[in-house]
Amino acid sequence: MHKEPLSTEVIQKLYKKGELAEASTRDPRALMQTAWLFISLYFGKQGRENQAAMKKSILSLVTTADGADYFEFSEPK
């Protein structure tokens, strides 16, 4: 069954309630939840049922020509 995507308003409420946090936070739980949310949004498969199968090996750290680092999704073979 197709679910509606999270709206900006819902994500803002999660930040206000302390469930999500900025990268500078000292709350490891909120930081982990924030990282998982954005990894799931941008790299996740189309449903929650596939999240358990996600491994850190699906992300590759890549460096641009000007030295900036970013993560790239690498499809498992």
Image (tube, rainbow, N blue to C red):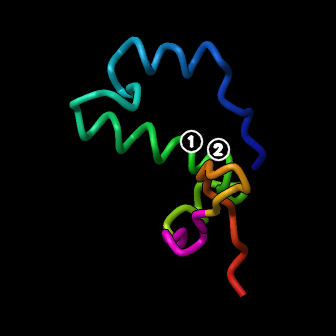
Q: Which residue is mark 1?
A: 38
Q: Residue at x 61, y 57 (%)?
A: 71
Q: Is residue 31 left or right of residue 11?
A: left
* Tally of numbered discs: 2
Q: CA distance from mark 2 to mark 1?
A: 5 Å
Mark 2 — residue? 41
Q: Residues within 10 Å of mark 1 (few under 14, many from 20)?
A: few
Where does the magenta region start and end? 53-61
Q: Is residue 1 magenta?
A: no
Image position, residue 67 (x, y; %): 62, 52
Say if mark 2 contacts mark 1, CB within 8 Å: yes
Residue 20 vs 73, above or below: the answer is above
Q: Dot 2 surroundings within 10 Å: few (below 14), some, or many (20 or more)?
A: some
| Residue kind at label 2, given as amino acid type | Leu
> Element at badge 2?
helix
Q: Residue at x 39, y 41 (%)?
A: 33
Quadrant of the image occupied by residue 34? top left
Q: Position of residue 35 (x, y in %)?
A: 46, 44
Q: Amino acid at mark 1?
A: Phe
Q: Nearer the viewer, residue 16 or 28?
A: 28
Q: Viewed as shown, does residue 34 lie left or right of 70?
A: left
Name which residue lies at 55% across and 61% down. 51
User: Does residue 60 belong to the magenta stretch?
Assistant: yes
Tag 1 secondary structure: helix
Q: Is residue 63 above or below residue 4?
A: below
Q: Residue at x 65, y 56 (%)?
A: 44
Q: Is residue 32 above or below residue 49?
A: above
